[in-house]
């Protein structure tokens, strides 16, 4: 994790830090309610909400259980692409 943090804050990085909006928080609550059996929680819900808003369904995660089940989009029909 330390290496990842160093890479993220490195000015030469290709990572983008994305601010979380109030709308993202509201959407994360909707996703948590829709997929209540997963008990997504704040962080996973926000990750999914931001991926949806940015229209970038690729998610770098080790939490395959939750993210393999969550669907995003207005009709909850788009699966997230899990990396690595």
Image: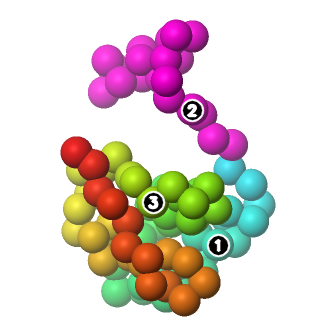
Residue 58, quarter of the rendered image: bottom left
Q: Residue at x 55, y 78 (%)?
A: 73
Residue at the spot of label 3? 57
Tag 2 or tag 1, which sits nearer the N-term?
2
Name the residue at 77% across, 61% down: 22
Q: Quadrant of the C terminus?
A: top left
**Cα gap from disc 1 to disc 2, whole angstroms:** 21 Å
Q: In the displayed structure, does residue 26 sit left or right of residue 59?
A: right
| 44 vs 74, nearest the viewer | 74
Q: Secondary structure at mark 3?
A: loop
Q: Earlier in the sequence, mark 1 or mark 3?
A: 1
The residue under label 1 is 27
Q: Position of residue 81 (x, y in %)?
A: 33, 60
Rendered image: mark on residue 69: none
Left or right? Give the position of 23 relative to 17: right
Q: Residues within 10 Å of mark 2 (few under 14, many from 20)?
A: few
The image shows residue 50 at horizontal and vertical percentages of 59, 57
Q: Is residue 52 above or below residue 5?
A: below
Q: CA distance from mark 2 to mark 3?
A: 15 Å
Look at the numbered disc 2 and give the secondary structure of its residue: loop
For the residue carrying disc 1, how many other residues have a C-alpha within 10 Å: few (<14), some (14-19), or many (20+)? some
Q: Is residue 65 magenta?
A: no
Viewed as shown, does residue 2 lie left or right of 52?
left
Looking at the image, is 60 positioned above or below residue 73?
Answer: above
Magenta residues span: 1-19
Which of the two labelled residues, at mark 2 and mark 3, occupies the earlier sequence position? 2
Rendered image: mark on residue 16: 2
């Amino acid at each position: 994790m330390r290496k990842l943090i160093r890479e993220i804050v490195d000015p030469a990085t290709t990572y983008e830090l994305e601010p979380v909006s109030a709308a993202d928080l509201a959407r994360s609550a909707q996703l948590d309610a829709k997929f209540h059996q997963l008990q997504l929680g704040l962080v996973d819900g926000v990750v999914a909400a931001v991926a949806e808003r940015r229209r970038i369904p690729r998610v770098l995660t080790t939490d395959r259980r939750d993210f393999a089940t969550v669907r995003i989009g207005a009709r909850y029909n788009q699966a997230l692409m899990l990396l690595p």
